[in-house]
Amino acid sequence: MRAGTWIVTGGAGFIASNFVRLALEEGWCERVIVFDLLTYAGRLENLAPMIEADPRLVFVRGDIADGEAVEELLDSHPADMVFNFAAESHVDRSIHDAAPFVRTNVLGTQLLVSASRRHGVRRYIQVSTDEVYGALPLDGEERFHEERPYAPKSPYAASKAGADFLVLAAHHTHGQNVIVTNCSNNYGPYQFPEKLIPLMIMNALNGRKLPVYGDGLYVRDWIHVEDHCRAVRACAIDGQAGETYCIGADNEQPNINVIRRILELTGRDETLIEYVKDRPGHDRRYAIDSSKVHREIGWKPAISWEDGLASTVEWYRKNTAWLESVTKGDFGAYYERHYGGK
Ligand code: NAD
Ligand code: DAU
């Protein structure tokens, strides 16, 4: 069954632009309304060429933390489902200044979920993160799962946790039809090069140093962005109202291994590695137990780490114009301040 109109907030960012592309290519719905503020991380380039060529895609520039703009969006675009991907998403930025995180991630979510209820949106999907569960010890079998209490450690994670609680409270209090998904670290095309994998690929391609935080033995559980997008769609269609679903691809990797593999794939050697000051409060390990989504939704990841990382490196190698375009302006200043231009 094809659904009607989907509103996708943050649709010019990394994950949601991949979601929109798949939705249009594979006919997941009839119309997609992208609502995005176009912050430093939101780029219309990420939606090219669909944005000019596909009449099923409508772009509306706006802020989820602006109540009037959200009302107007839902008035002029009655929607079957709302997918909230919009967020401030980078942990390091949240350490420098948490205020935009609280505004967009907490206030924005609250305004969007309550406006969706008032406008009769059939289902609201909150796209969230595994970081709400805090950090795991390096050694051990423990993994994050839906029953684990929230224990966010960074300002980013705390703001996402607050948002998830507000969404679940809307279900509990008002009976609103909501779903929350908590996914592990994504990688793939169109990821802004402040995050580990695209930053390392960009620097390796340019022969610049690769800044490794601390001892480089922090572990993340990597999933290809297309697998995540398919999981979000599957949960939106087959999930139970008021439930949360943990999404991952059983792919734990220490950062240093990820970086070494990128060096191999870009034909560079380890002299580019530079150990730098650690991230304050750095979460040691994330790992997801996705058995609920396998069992109840029937979703499984399809892209192997080996193929996914190789094709991602290839995508950045081919898309140097995109890289140049997105690293102009604000990012240039951020990069110089944060990495000292190394
Ligand atoms: P991103 O930073 O690449 O994109 C965020 C998008 O949101 C941008 O297009 C930006 O312009 C837009 N935006 C920011 N503030 C806004 C506002 N006030 N109103 C409207 N639009 C606004 O983020 P991403 O990595 O694609 O993450 C998307 C979502 O997935 C986020 O909610 C994030 O918490 C979640 N998530 C990310 C990962 C990951 O590994 N990147 C993993 C799990 C969950
Ligand atoms: O787990 C899901 C989360 O993954 C998402 O919710 C976040 O939006 C997303 O940014 C990501 O958070 P991380 O902090 O795990 O991702 P990041 O790419 O910033 O860092 C990954 C790891 O790499 C982490 O251990 C820090 C380390 N790192 C990162 C950068 C940018 C480095 O060693 N050097 C770097 O320059």
Image (tube, grey):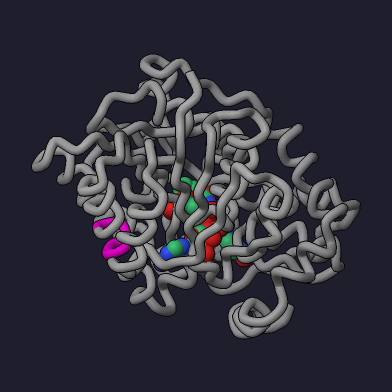
Location of residue 216 in the rendering, given as x and y in whole percent from the top left corner: 59, 57
Which of the pair 188/45 is nearer the observer? 45
List the single residue furthest toward the right: 267
Q: Quadrant of residue 337 in the image?
A: bottom right
Q: Which of 42 and 2 is in front in this view?
A: 2
Q: In this view, does 97 lie to the left or right of 227?
A: left
| Image coordinates for residue 315, horizontal then vertical, percent | 80, 48
Q: How many labels does the image show?
A: 0
Residue that appears at 20% across and 42% down: 168
Against 146, residue 128 (above or below) is below
Looking at the figure, which quarter contains the C terminus? bottom right
Q: Which residue is drawn at 40% across and 30% down?
A: 236
**Residue 168 seen:** yes
Identity of the residue furthest to the left in this view: 173
Between 294 and 71, the residue placed more toward the observer is 71
Q: What stretch is highlighted in magenta?
A: 106-110
Residue drawn at point x = 60 percent, y = 29 percent: 27
In screen coordinates, is 115 left or right of 211?
left
57 versus 241 height, above or below: below
